[in-house]
Each structure stands twice: as C-alpha cells, then as structure tokens.
Amino acid sequence: MRFRHVVLEGPIGVGKTTLARALAEHWGARLVLEHAADNPYLERFYQHMGGQGAGRGNPLALPTQLSFLFDRVEQLKELAQPGMFERGVVSDFLFAKDRIFALLTLGDEDLALYQQIYKRHSAQATAPDLVIWLQAEPDVLMARIKKRGLAAERGLSEEYLRALADGYHRYFANHRASPVLAVNTDAFHPAENRDDFQRLLERIERFRGPFEFYDPPDRPGRAASGLAGKAGKGSSSGLIIS
C-alpha cells in the first residue's frame, strides 16, 4: 500500500463505501467507515426535504449534523490509537465532509452554533496521505441512488445532489491539507468492474500530486450505457477538467 491513509470522498451515491471496501481488501488495510445508518435523525431529515432541494431551515438539519459530527469525533479517537496505521487505513469520509453538508443545510443561527462545535474538534483530525475524490453528474448519482433503493434516501432530489456536488467542488478548490486525486466516475466503475479497478490502482501508483484529475477513457462498448462522455461538459456539478 503506497499511501498509509487513503480517504474516499464525494457526494451521496458516488460509490465511496463500496470502493473503500474493495481497496481495503486489496491492500490488506484496516477499513474505517462512517456510520450513516446509525444516525437516528437522517431518515426523517430526508423525508422532511420532500424532494425540494437542499432545504435550509429543515428542522431536522441541526440534530442530523451534530449526530454525524459527534460520531466522527469518536472515530477520530479510534484513528489516534497506537498502531492504527501499521497496515494502512482506508476510510470513506473526511472529517471535513460534515461541514460541507452543514453549509448546505443549516440556517444562519444553527450554522453559527455548529461552527463553534466543529472548530473545537476539527484540530484533532489528522490529514490523510491521499484523498480520492469521486465525482459524477447529478443525474448519474440519482440513478445510482434509485438503483440501491434505500428507504432513507427516497426524499433526495437531483437538485440537492447538484448543490452537494457544488459544495464538494468549493471545498476541494481550497483544500491544501492532503494530496487529491479526483476521478470522474460517470462511466467508470472501479468497485464493480475488475478492469476499471486495476486501472484505478495503476493511476494511484502514478499519482504525484498535489492535485490530479483522472477522466478514464471509455472501455469498448461502455458508451452503450448512455453515461459515457458526460465529463468535460462543464455542468454545475463541479467536475474539474485538467
């Protein structure tokens, strides 16, 4: 494993957790996943959105974000244990991701309170050695979310996913703490396709940083899926083109 601590990041539905599992298994690394299913407010937060976009002012937004934040604080303690990184760590979240969501969903007063709590704990977060930022167009994300069919995600809208992708774009435009490999996954499926997975591994080995964008060329026949060729069209989702 070339990098001691690798983080997968990106919007809902982009495939972070599935790919994190595959990479951890391949490298024999420790896997650290966020506990989204354990958040007692998340499903009701999505239900309250009712497909109406980001929905600042959602009454469930603050408890949802604080629940995630405090859970991540506990996971930071886990990562701080001696010997945690001896065989490498792969995780599917940055500590900072919670703030990306908070900026999108919280009203001004709730955000001010959240920022105070976040600032108190963020200094404990260690920067990973590599962040793999998975990107996809909002319609692609929506299709993947519908395919996996989680009841808690039925309230998500394409508008919300577009706003979330834009939030990631703004964050990584100013991110300097870790090297970043951005990957367009519109028609690239490294967690599901063996050839794509191998291509990603090779790209990671060639990474020199501090920021690189990987827009994989199409495999033969992949255009038939209707997803090929989306990258580079300058959509509002924030795909970075090198």
Image (cartoon, rainbow, N blue to C red):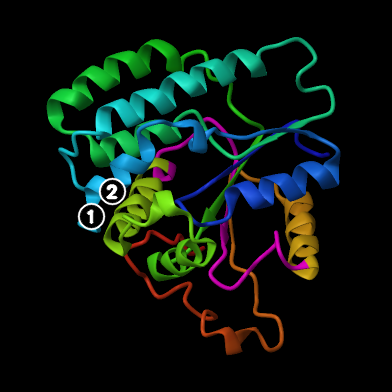
Percent x, y for residue 164? 35, 50
Instruction: Work out whether 227 lies above or below 161.
Output: below
Instruction: Work out whether 239 lies above or below 227.
Output: above
- Residue 47, disc: 2
Q: Categorize mark 1 by other alpha carbons within 10 Å: few (<14), some (14-19), many (20+).
A: few
State the residue in front, 13 or 108: 13
Instruction: Work out whether 106 lies above or below 19.
Output: above
Determine the residue located farthest toward the front in the rendered image.
Answer: 151
* Contact flag, marks 1 and 2 (Cβ < 8 Å): yes
Q: Which residue is drawn at 59% across and 87% down?
A: 223
168 is within the stretch colored magenta: no
| Element marked by disc 2 | helix
Q: Quadrant of residue 53?
A: bottom left
- The amino acid type found where label 1 is placed reads Gly
Marks 1/2: CA distance? 5 Å
Q: Categorize mark 2 by other alpha carbons within 10 Å: few (<14), some (14-19), many (20+).
A: some
Q: In which quarter of the image is residue 50?
A: bottom left
State the residue in front, 203 or 28: 28
Percent x, y for residue 220? 71, 87
State the residue in front, 36 or 105: 36
Q: Which residue is drawn at 25% across and 39% down?
A: 105
Q: Give the range drawn in magenta.
A: 172-193
- Residue 50, disc: 1
Q: Which residue is drawn at 67% across and 51% down?
A: 19
Q: Is residue 10 left or right of residue 165?
A: right
- The amino acid type found where label 2 is placed reads Gln
State the residue in front, 149 or 224: 149
Percent x, y for residue 18? 65, 51
**SS assignment for the magenta stretch, majority:** loop
| Element marked by disc 1 | loop
173 is within the stretch colored magenta: yes
